[in-house]
Amino acid sequence: MKKGGRKGGPPEGAQVVVQNRKARHDYSIEEQVEAGLALTGSEVKSLRAGNVALADAYALVKNGELWLASCRIGEYQPASYTGHAPTRERKLLLRRAEIDRLAGKVEKAGYTLVPLSLYFKDGWAKVELGLARGRTHEDRRDAIAEREQRREMDRAMSRRRR
């Protein structure tokens, strides 16, 4: 479970590298979990340079371990031959009970694990995963209408305060 921080984003004091805004549009996020990332040195350098794409990334459970797939961390040019493969699967670090709980929900309830943001917290690379359910076209339309309605209410309240 995510502790502290704001609703809908990484915790306070975290250095955000990239956010997956498309995921919040395409999915309804039920729950958010913070996981560590097992990376090589050149991947960390490339992350700090902001050379990463989360657009099509997802997390999957394989042999009782959690993996981040389709996340592209570009090559770090100064690393030369000691670099890394840009689209390799990266291991996510979570407690066994959390992995088992998430795996159960993904298998039985039809959820998907989607990375919402990637950031550095206290010098460690972290990924915020969302336990998500896909939205249909009508659901997206409803979410947009609800958001617009909320904005209108806020505008009216601010006009009234003046």
Image (spheres, rainbow, N blue to C red):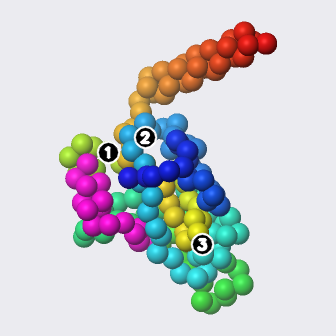
Find numbered disc 2 in the image and state the secondary structure of the residue it sits on. strand
Q: Earlier in the sequence, mark 3 or mark 2?
A: 2
- 3D distance between C-alphas at marks 3 and 2: 27 Å
Across and down, in percent, residue 81 comes to 62, 90
What residue type is disc 2 on?
Ile
Please tell me which residue is depicted at 25% across the width and 55% down the height of the picture: 101
What residue type is disc 1 on?
Tyr
- Relative depth, front residue between 31 and 4: 4
The residue tagged 1 is: 111
- 3D distance between C-alphas at marks 3 and 1: 31 Å
Please tell me which residue is depicted at 68% across the width and 11% down the height of the picture: 156
Quadrant of res 148: top right
The residue tagged 2 is: 29
Q: Earlier in the sequence, mark 3 or mark 1?
A: 1
- Relative depth, front residue between 22 and 39: 39
81 left or right of 28 in image = right
Farthest residue to the front: give it.
Answer: 161
Q: Nearer the viewer, mark 3 or mark 1?
A: 3
What residue type is disc 3 on?
Gly
Q: Which residues are magenta?
A: 89-105
Residue 123 image label? 3
